[in-house]
Image (tube, grey):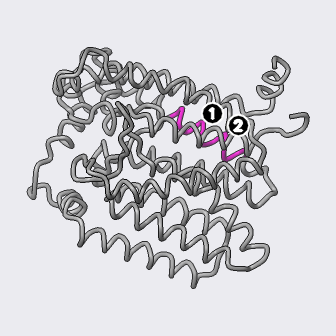
């Protein structure tokens, strides 16, 4: 076992692994700081949220290790199982009574809630890479199958509704298409597909329409969370007010999840916020460098897709906190509270480590 772990350690990109653990550690600190206001507001016991979050940490670390040890074949099989199971669950939640803020995205299991669509993200990226690489080599029905799967995902997400997740998955999938190098005709068709789904979401879901309209015209509705987020971002100065001493962050309803970056900015300051962004960029850079060395089309598309869905989620979350785009209700990888998000991101990192590891002697 010692030799096995030793071989594993020297086969993976250790920078990606260590920086991921660093982000997880920072997330614990920020959730501990931000959860007190949430616990008081909803009458939870002291440290309830951080204790609940800590339960998922050993599982997350195990998932990173487990997925990083998988062979390419086993990674594909695991992705197929996760995708099929979670896609079915994403439709099942539509018929359950559990509803939060007008959305049906979560499956309640005892004291925990699971968001199946979170696990569709990494699984679908790998399946899409497999189908696209097959289409490139054989020019068969693989592309059509891929499009059918995307349509099923879109139907589930828009029905919940979870427009932000749809945008994240679609732009990642579209990026894979660009990397594959398809014809302009197919590109125009896919852009039209994305535009039609967006338009349908806009006209059929009032909260999507409100968020988009309110982003362009602030007089249309309440901007309480956005204003508090901007105040928190600007009030921390270079070095912050100190952990647990933030004022605006205590009032943010989703400070522990969607607006965790605002907590970091107010309590730890501009310098530390830049450090967090720098860590994300280093992970993305390391994966990109490793990806450019790959001559296998499937591995190239899968690794590229996983790194892009990871960085796109970061960009969406931080941009929403800074009011650069309409709010999406999306977590910040490894920093935000939430078991589903933490485990999903762990699958992404573990899969990346598996795809990019040195396979000689392991």
Q: Is residue 5 magenta?
A: no
Residue on which disc 2 sits = 68
User: For residue 249, which numbered disc appears in the image?
Assistant: none
Q: Is residue 283 magenta?
A: yes
Q: Residues within 10 Å of mark 2 (few under 14, many from 20)?
A: many
User: Compared to 351, does 110 lie above or below?
Assistant: above
**Mark 1, secondary structure of its residue:** helix
From mark 1 to mark 2, how far is it between C-alphas?
A: 6 Å
The image quadrant of residue 36 is: top left
Determine the residue positioned at 53% across, 40% down.
345
**Magenta stretch: helix, strand or loop mostly:** helix
Judge the density around disc 1: few (<14), some (14-19), many (≥20) Cα neighbours within 10 Å. Answer: many
Percent x, y of residue 89: 45, 53
Q: Which residue is mark 1?
A: 64
Q: Position of residue 355 (x, y in %)?
A: 73, 45
Question: What residue do we see at 61% from left, 39% from top?
Answer: 349
Looking at the image, which residue is at 40% across and 63% down? Answer: 156
- Quadrant of the image for the N terminus? top right
Quadrant of the rendered structure where residue 41 is?
Answer: top left
Q: Is residue 265 left or right of residue 279?
A: left
Q: Residue 142 location in percent, x, y?
A: 67, 74
Q: Secondary structure at mark 2?
A: helix
Are the residues at dot 1 and dot 2 in contact (C-beta closer than 8 Å)? yes
Range shown magenta: 278-290
Residue 145's image quarter?
bottom right
Q: Which residue is more in the foreground, 110 or 166? A: 110
Of all residues, the one furthest to the right in this rendering is 361
């Amino acid at each position: 076992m010692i030799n096995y772990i030793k071989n594993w350690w020297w086969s993976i990109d250790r920078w990606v692994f260590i920086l991921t653990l660093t982000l997880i550690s920072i997330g614990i600190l920020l959730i501990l700081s931000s959860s007190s206001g949430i616990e008081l507001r909803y009458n939870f016991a002291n440290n309830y949220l951080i204790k609940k979050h800590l339960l998922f940490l050993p599982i997350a670390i195990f998932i990173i290790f487990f997925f990083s040890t998988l062979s390419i074949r086993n990674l594909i099989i695991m992705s197929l199982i996760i995708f099929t199971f979670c896609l079915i669950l994403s439709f099942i939640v539509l018929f359950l009574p559990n509803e939060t803020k007008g959305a049906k995205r979560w499956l309640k299991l005892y004291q925990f809630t699971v968001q199946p669509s979170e696990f569709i993200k990494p699984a679908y990226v790998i399946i899409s890479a497999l189908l696209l690489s097959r289409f490139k080599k054989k020019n068969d029905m693989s592309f059509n199958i891929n499009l059918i799967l995307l349509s099923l995902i879109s139907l589930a997400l828009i029905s919940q509704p979870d427009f932000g997740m749809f945008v994240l998955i679609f732009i990642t999938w579209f990026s894979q298409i660009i990397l594959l190098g398809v014809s302009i005709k197919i590109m125009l068709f896919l852009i039209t597909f994305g535009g039609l789904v967006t338009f349908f979401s806009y006209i059929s879901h009032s909260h999507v329409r409100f968020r988009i309209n309110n982003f362009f015209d602030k007089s249309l509705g309440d901007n309480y969370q956005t204003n508090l987020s901007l105040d928190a971002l600007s009030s921390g100065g270079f070095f912050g007010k100190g952990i647990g001493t933030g004022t605006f962050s205590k009032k943010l309803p989703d400070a522990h999840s969607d607006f965790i970056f605002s907590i970091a900015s107010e309590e730890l300051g501009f310098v530390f916020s830049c450090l967090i962004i720098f860590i994300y960029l280093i992970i993305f850079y390391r994966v990109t460098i490793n990806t450019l060395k790959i001559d296998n089309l499937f591995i190239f598309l899968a690794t590229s897709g996983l790194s892009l869905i990871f960085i796109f989620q970061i960009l969406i979350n931080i941009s929403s906190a800074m009011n650069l785009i309409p709010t999406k209700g999306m977590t910040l990888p490894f920093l935000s509270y939430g078991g589903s998000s933490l485990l999903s991101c762990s699958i992404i990192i573990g899969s990346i480590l598996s795809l990019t590891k040195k396979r000689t002697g392991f």
